[in-house]
Image: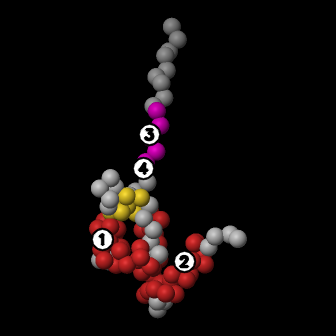
Amino acid sequence: MAERSSPSPAAPPPAAPPRYRVGELARLGRVSRQTIHNYVVLGLLVPAGCTPGGHRLFDEMARRRLELVARLLRRGYTLRDIRELFRERWDARPS
């Protein structure tokens, strides 16, 4: 009798991208919730979506950008400098 092989286990579903609410992102970045809101207004952070209740959600890219802003601030850059760097690097649209 032929040995029956068990079916291979199904691959786990892909993990959903992390979605952070303002308070969670603020805690991770060790900044205030108001700072997160200010960075959104300045264009330094961009929400990835929102909850059905209207709360902003941020993805992993926003968390990384928040870390980069903190590093640049520690090195003496101003928020205006950082905004210009971000515009030149990531936000520029091809003509």
Q: Give the CA distance from mark 4 to mark 3.
A: 12 Å
Instruction: Say which residue label 3 marks.
Output: 12
Q: Which mark is residue 86?
A: 2
Q: Is residue 20 visible?
A: no
- Where residue 84 sits: x, y (%)? 55, 83
The residue that label 1 is drawn on is 27
Q: Earlier in the sequence, mark 1 or mark 2?
A: 1
Between marks 1 and 2, how big is the CA–CA gap?
A: 23 Å
Up/down of 52 relative to 42, above or below: above
| Image quadrant in which the C terminus is located | bottom right
Decide which of tag 1 and tag 3 comes sooner along the chain: 3
Name the element at disc 4: loop
Mark drawn on residue 16: 4
Rounded to the nearest angstrom, the CA distance separating label 2 from label 4 is 26 Å
Going from N to C along the chain, the mark reached first, 2 or 4, is 4
Classify mark 3: helix, strand or loop.
loop
